[in-house]
Amino acid sequence: MPTGRATMIDKTAIKAIQHYITISGDAAYTLQELRDIAGADAKPAIDTLIRRQVLGRLGQGLYVPMKEGVFRPGPVPAFPFEQSCACVLQKLRIEFRPGRAVRDYNAGRTTQVPARVIFEVRGNRMPQMGYGKQVLLYDNKTYPKSELARFAAIDPWPCDGELSADQAIQRLRDYMRAVPDSIYLRQDFEHLALQQTATAIRTIISKNLVAELGTGIYGRLESSGGGYQLAAGGLYRAVCRALDRMDIEWRPRMAWRRYQSGAGPKPSVPSFEVRGRRRPRLQYAGVPVAYDNEQMSPAELRTVGRDDPWPEMGWPPR
């Protein structure tokens, strides 16, 4: 029979994971990711959330958030199966692209709607994922090693000549459908649109597909109540994803950490502490992103994060 302390820790872990799911808004989560949030009590807390149908199993050590179904009773995954699988591969840093059938359909070369979710991945890591009758398939097992080593590193959708502006715009739209993400960087588009990159980006901005959050950083938009909003669910989440994509070590500022732990109100402006001197200027709808470690010395900025990027007592003393 569990002790009172064990039960208390378990409840704390459950609350921490639930709060993280609400704040992050991701399409899938890994066991290691949730352990970073809940510590040693993560696994029993996850099992409890699965019994409560807050989480669902996507694979070994992989989980998806659940929501109440609209067209059928009971909980269903909160995101499409393909998007959850793509989220996992991104978190595991596995380079991937949709299978040939999906690429042909997106490019208009066929009207046959792919019936299965198929990805090609770079390398030999192919985590097994499935939910209900849906199973993620991989179709690159017969690819030569030389092609696996090269594809997606230069251009995942190569072309035979110079692109027109319309072709470049269509390729960017196809890419956004095939690789759902809340943040795109200019280099994501440059490999696809080539010399037409600037024109294609201006067009997808004018069509409210993305919004420019900073130089070379674009947030995906989705329609909402007659208008548009960031697909990440807000500027804070979009910036978190942007910093991750730029490989910048970060943590929320103290006010946000207090809000996330339930000890304070929600701040009005997204604010972060980052390691190093890279602090991209980001804003959306007139709301800027703030950084609060401007006064740290270069030595401190180099030291922070070497052993523990977020030490218990805060940043190292000046």
Image (tube, helix red, strand yellow):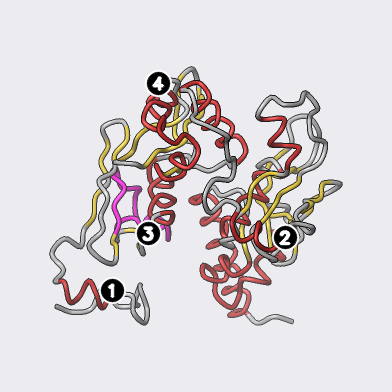
Q: Which residue is disc 1 drawn over?
A: 314
In the displayed structure, 57 sits above or below 68; it is below
Instruction: Measuring from the top left, give residue 42's x and y in whole percent.
Output: 61, 71
Secondary element type, mark 3: loop
Front disc: 4 or 2: 2
Magenta-highlighted residues: 254-272
Check if mark 4's residue and mark 2's residue have beta carbons within 8 Å.
no
Residue 87 lies, in percent from the top left, at 60, 51
Residue that sits furthest to the top in the current view: 226
User: What residue is disc 4 on?
Assistant: 206
- Which label sits on residue 144? 2
Q: What amino acid type should be assigned to the residue bearing mark 4?
A: Ser
The local secondary structure at tag 2 comes to loop
Figure label count: 4
Q: Residue 106 sits in which quadrant?
A: top right
Q: In this rendering, would 305 be left or right of 155?
A: left
Q: Counting residues from the N terminus, which is met first, the one under dot 1 or under dot 4?
A: 4
Specify the amino acid type for callout 2.
Pro
Q: CA distance from mark 1 to mark 4?
A: 43 Å
Q: Position of residue 237 (x, y in %)?
A: 43, 47
The residue identified by callout 3 is 263
What is the secondary structure assignment of the residue under circle 1? loop
Number of residues whose C-alpha sits closer than 10 Å to that of mark 3, classed few (under 14), some (14–19) or many (20 or more): few
Q: Nearer the viewer, mark 2 or mark 1?
A: 2
